[in-house]
């Protein structure tokens, strides 16, 4: 039995910020799954900032897509056919698939979705790769201690929003940077951040941070880079830890601008800066999944998804990440549109 599907492919490489010309949709038929595979009807797919690096024809921490390749990322879907005894038709699963109506998943990469814990889109956010990134990035790299001040850039995004809540659960004072009043209000009123800074509404980041974090910064979880990070690095306390997760402020630059060097700001506080890739913690993913599910079920970690409807709108959902359209995790609800 074959299944007809539409799928998005990389049509051309972007120069600077991607646009609609970088994407093309094609149609094809998928045959029955081979041994160890699942054929899945996609219900939701994930768009993530790191995918911008995969659009380059250059080395990155994620393997670049070739021109004509289907775009790939996290999906949640219903099993149509399984060539693996662990799954059966009708099961809800999550894994890495294509931006498509129907996709193949490696059964070893797949995991069950339990809708009694959270709605399925959460398995692409707080209960998926972003949640695991927040979990390991903060706890293993940031090493928060009760009473620490933790600052998060991109705090209203998929990763940052979970980072701040885990920091709060660990007894920290939490300060977030976000780009709208709606987002900063969500951080403080719903997620329990102690303070939030709308970077689009302030002229001087350092002054705003000094007011929000008067005792300095012990942990900085960086999703953004750019002038926000410059400001935070000027406020680091002795033995501060900086977890570098993302640099979305620079993803669309053809050449990274060089300005005043920031490394001298690390000397006096003896700060430690460490980059992180969640894949390094793959042997412990079950640990993160269990803890995050407990926190979500108990209401200790709140999740939110911005849902864009229709596979045809997947490129727009991806491009919206660079203009800050999303609150929480940006996902696409796949339908016949």
Image (cartoon, grey):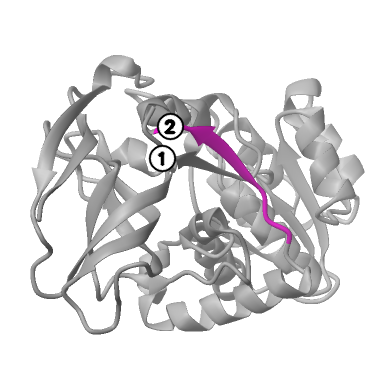
Q: Is residue 204 left or right of residue 5?
A: right
Between 217 and 91, the residue placed more toward the observer is: 91
Residue 294 visible in the shown view:
yes
Which residue sits at x=28%, y=41%? Answer: 100
104 over 71 or under it: above or below:
below
What whole-number distance in Å separates the C-alpha atoms at marks 1 and 2?
A: 5 Å
Marking on residue 159:
none
The quadrant the N terminus occupies is bottom left
- Contact? badges 1 and 2 (CB < 8 Å): yes
Between 317 and 265, the residue placed more toward the observer is: 317
Marking on residue 310:
2
173 over 235 or under it: above or below:
below
119 over 172 or under it: above or below:
above
Residue 282: percent from left, percent from top = 37, 75
Q: Is residue 2 magenta?
A: no
Q: Quadrant of residue 149?
A: bottom right
Q: Which residues are the magenta region?
A: 302-310
């Amino acid at each position: 039995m074959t299944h007809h599907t539409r799928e998005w492919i990389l049509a051309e490489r972007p120069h600077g910020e991607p646009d609609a010309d970088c994407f093309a949709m094609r149609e094809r038929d998928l045959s029955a799954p081979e041994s160890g595979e699942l054929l899945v009807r996609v219900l939701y797919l994930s768009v993530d900032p790191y995918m911008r690096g995969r659009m380059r024809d250059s080395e990155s921490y994620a393997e670049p897509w070739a021109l004509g390749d289907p775009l790939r990322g996290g999906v949640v879907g219903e099993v149509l056919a399984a060539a693996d005894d662990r799954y059966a038709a009708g099961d809800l699963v999550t894994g890495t698939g294509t931006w498509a109506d129907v996709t193949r998943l490696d059964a070893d990469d797949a995991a069950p979705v339990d809708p009694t814990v959270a709605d399925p889109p959460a398995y692409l956010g707080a209960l998926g790769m972003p949640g695991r990134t927040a979990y390991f990035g903060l706890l293993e790299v940031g090493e928060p201690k009760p009473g620490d001040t933790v600052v998060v850039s991109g705090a209203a995004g998929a990763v940052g929003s979970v980072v701040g809540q885990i920091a709060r659960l660990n007894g920290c004072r939490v300060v977030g940077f976000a780009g709208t009043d709606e987002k900063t209000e969500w951080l403080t009123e719903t997620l329990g951040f102690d303070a939030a800074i709308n970077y689009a509404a302030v002229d001087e980041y350092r002054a705003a941070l000094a007011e929000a974090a008067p005792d300095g910064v012990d942990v900085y979880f960086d999703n953004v880079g750019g002038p926000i990070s410059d400001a935070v690095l000027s406020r680091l306390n002795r033995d501060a830890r900086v977890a570098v997760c993302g640099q979305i402020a620079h993803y669309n630059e053809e050449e990274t601008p060089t300005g005043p060097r920031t490394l001298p700001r690390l000397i006096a506080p003896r700060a430690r800066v460490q980059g992180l890739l969640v894949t390094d913690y793959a042997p412990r993913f079950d640990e993160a999944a269990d803890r995050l599910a407990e926190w979500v079920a108990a209401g200790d970690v709140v999740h939110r998804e911005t849902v864009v409807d229709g596979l045809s709108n997947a490129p727009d959902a991806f491009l919206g990440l660079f203009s800050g359209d999303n609150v929480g995790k940006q996902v696409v609800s796949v339908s016949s549109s």
